[in-house]
Image: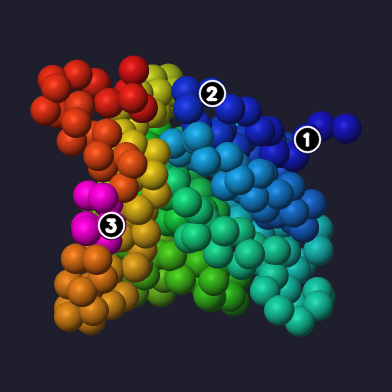
């Protein structure tokens, strides 16, 4: 039986690859359960500098599996009370302790857009197309909106949510959902270059930066100043901070970059 999500550690990152190309990596309960487990497994490995979300097949993720289960993995309509499997994945991505890199080929639709929006840095294939397609099925991008509205403006989201229209990788990058659009043949090279850059960075500091990106926009200005001042003091006194400053003074690489 084929694994629905492949797990591999390489280049200092955990690569989580959606592996149900025949269903265009649609979000069913089985795939969601395995992906959530893979995220938990990766988050428990402090030596990792990042997690990479990738997929096999012609489409990164086509959204909820409407042919099997009626979208219960996303909506939770047929499941127990509490968060649906998909909602738990979005929460795990939001709370992940390292940068989340997206390697996005083919395109993403519906719930797949929530995975894309949960990536800190998403590299898109130029050929990819995207859509918040729910409205054309009599649905709304409800859970999807949680990470998306933290990335794009209300005006942009309104047009795309209301119309369900297709848009290009270049447009996705312009609105902040993607970092860079490259030919599909260059996706791996671009992601590996990013990971090579992250290998120069302190693992603990990467995790703290991710929390800054998630938490500071939700704080008041004064709360952010107080919290960030305390964080700065803490990191200057941390083992990583001391090693980084010593390496700078001694004109050598810090231990994590050797």
* Residue pictured at 66% horizontal, 44% vertical: 41
Q: Which mark is residue 234?
A: 3
Question: Which image quadrant is residue 252 in?
Answer: top left
Instruction: Give the CA separation, mark 1 to mark 2.
Output: 19 Å
Q: Secondary structure at mark 3?
A: helix
Q: Is residue 56 magenta?
A: no
Horizontal relation, residue 5 to residue 241: left or right: right
Badge 3, how many Cα within 10 Å: few under 14, some, many 20+? few
Please state the horizontal and vertical placement of residue 184, each as a whole percent of the image: 42, 26
| Numbered range of the magenta stretch | 231-237
Q: Which residue is mark 2?
A: 10
Horizontal relation, residue 236 to residue 160: left or right: left
Q: How is the image coloured?
A: rainbow
* Residue pictured at 40% horizontal, 33% vertical: 125
Badge 2, how many Cα within 10 Å: few under 14, some, many 20+? few
* Residue pictured at 45% horizontal, 55% vertical: 118
Q: Is residue 235 magenta?
A: yes
Label located before the other in sequence (1 or 3)? 1
Please state the horizontal and vertical placement of residue 165, each as a whole percent of the image: 41, 60
Foreground: disc 3 or disc 2: 3
Label located before the other in sequence (1 or 2)? 1
Name the main secondary structure of what is drawn in magenta.
helix
């Amino acid at each position: 039986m084929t694994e629905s999500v492949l797990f591999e550690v390489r280049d200092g990152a955990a690569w989580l690859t959606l592996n149900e190309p025949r269903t265009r990596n649609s979000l069913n309960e089985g795939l969601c359960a395995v992906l959530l487990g893979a995220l938990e497994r990766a988050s428990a490995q402090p030596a990792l500098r990042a997690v990479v979300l990738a997929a096999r097949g012609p489409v990164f993720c086509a959204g909820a599996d409407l042919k099997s289960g009626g979208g219960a993995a996303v909506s939770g309509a047929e499941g127990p009370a509490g968060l649906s499997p998909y909602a738990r994945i979005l929460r795990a991505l939001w709370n992940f302790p390292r940068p989340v890199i997206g390697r996005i080929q083919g395109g993403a639709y519906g719930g797949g857009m929530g995975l894309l929006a949960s990536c800190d840095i998403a590299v898109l294939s130029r050929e990819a197309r995207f859509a918040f397609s729910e409205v054309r099925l009599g649905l709304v991008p409800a859970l999807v909106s949680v990470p998306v509205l933290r990335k794009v403006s209300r005006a942009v989201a309104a047009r795309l949510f209301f119309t369900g229209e297709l848009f290009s990788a270049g447009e996705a990058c312009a609105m902040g959902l993607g970092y860079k659009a490259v030919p599909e043949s260059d996706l791996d090279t671009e992601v590996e270059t990013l990971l090579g850059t992250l290998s120069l960075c302190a693992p603990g500091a990467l995790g703290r930066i991710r929390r800054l990106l998630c938490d500071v926009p939700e704080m008041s200005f004064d709360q952010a100043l107080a919290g960030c001042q305390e964080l700065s003091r803490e990191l200057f006194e941390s083992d990583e901070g001391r090693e980084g400053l010593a390496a700078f003074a001694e004109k050598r690489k810090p231990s994590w970059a050797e």
